[in-house]
Amino acid sequence: MKVILFGATGMVGQGVLRECLVDAGVTEVLSVGRGPTGVQNAKLHEILHDDFTNFSKIESRLAGYDACLFCLGVSSIGMDPERYRHLTYDVTMAAAKTLARLNPGMVFTYVTGKGTDSTEQGSLRWARVKGKTENDLLKLPFKAAYMFRPSGIQPLHGVRSKTGWINVVYALTAPLLSWMVRAVPTQMTTSEQLGRAMIKVARDGYPKPILESADINAI
């Protein structure tokens, strides 16, 4: 399976990239990002690209892939609402529409989050934006599309946040998080389990398009 990965330098994307590189069934990974991953591997190819609303300059390199693992995302905390919508909805849809046109047999997997509002009518703006993004992705002519809604994610295997204080929190709470993954699988998963689940779903499918933490852990 040949996959395109968006967001490989973020915490979620780092974990997904790691699982792709150790999975023998993934033969090629194309990372599309604004900066390099810093990872060296024979399976990994990288494209540095600045305009994530227009992929016309690199379209020729985006065809011929079986799956997209889309891990780009930002927190809405402290962010201008229109900026959040642009980064969450506009960027995701620009990439997805391009890939759907170039790879009609592709499976698209999207990391969203627990609490996403599929009705697009709730009181939380971020949840409505995420819900609209999910809904519009599911309308695109992919072979299939799956929305991953993890709650908490414990980073493993050296995966780190870009925010220093968050890494400190993860380090201090590691024993608690490990216990929660086992004891409360509906609320907690790991970067390893998320990556492995995305790969398996891209390869084998899943009975429903929206996966919560319990689904991710079960897979």
Image (tube, rainbow, N blue to C red):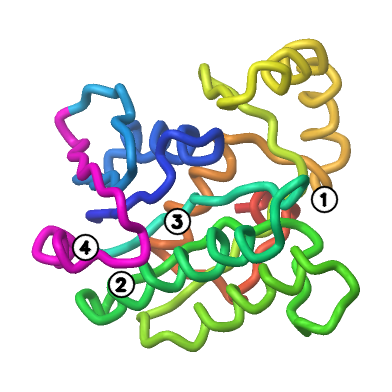
Q: Is residue 189 left or right of residue 23?
A: right
N-terminal of the pair, mark 1 or mark 3, is 3
Q: Which residue is mark 1?
A: 186
Amino acid on which the number 3 mark rests in the picture: Phe
For the residue pair 71 and 57, the one nearer the viewer reads as 57
Residue 177 x/y as whole percent: 80, 26
Label 4 to label 2: alpha-carbon separation = 7 Å
- Provide the secondary structure element on which disc 4 rests: loop
Identify the disc placed on residue 158. none
Amino acid on which the number 2 mark rests in the picture: Met
Does the segment drawn in magenta span residue 53?
yes
N-terminal of the pair, mark 4 or mark 2, is 4
Which mark is nearer the camera, 2 or 1? 2
Amino acid on which the number 4 mark rests in the picture: Tyr
N-terminal of the pair, mark 2 or mark 1, is 2
- Provide the secondary structure element on which disc 3 rests: strand
Q: Is residue 105 left or right of residue 156?
A: left
Query: Would you place residue 135 above or below residue 187 in this image?
Result: below
- Provide the secondary structure element on which disc 2 rests: loop
Q: Which residue is mark 3?
A: 70
Q: Quadrant of residue 147?
A: bottom right
Mark 4–mark 2 CB contact (< 8 Å): yes
- Provide the secondary structure element on which disc 1 rests: loop
Identify the disc placed on residue 65. 4
Query: Would you place residue 111 above or below residue 116 in this image?
Result: above
Q: Quadrant of residue 1?
A: bottom left
Label 2 to label 3: alpha-carbon separation = 13 Å
Q: From which residue to which does the magenta span run?
A: 42-65
Amino acid on which the number 1 mark rests in the picture: Thr
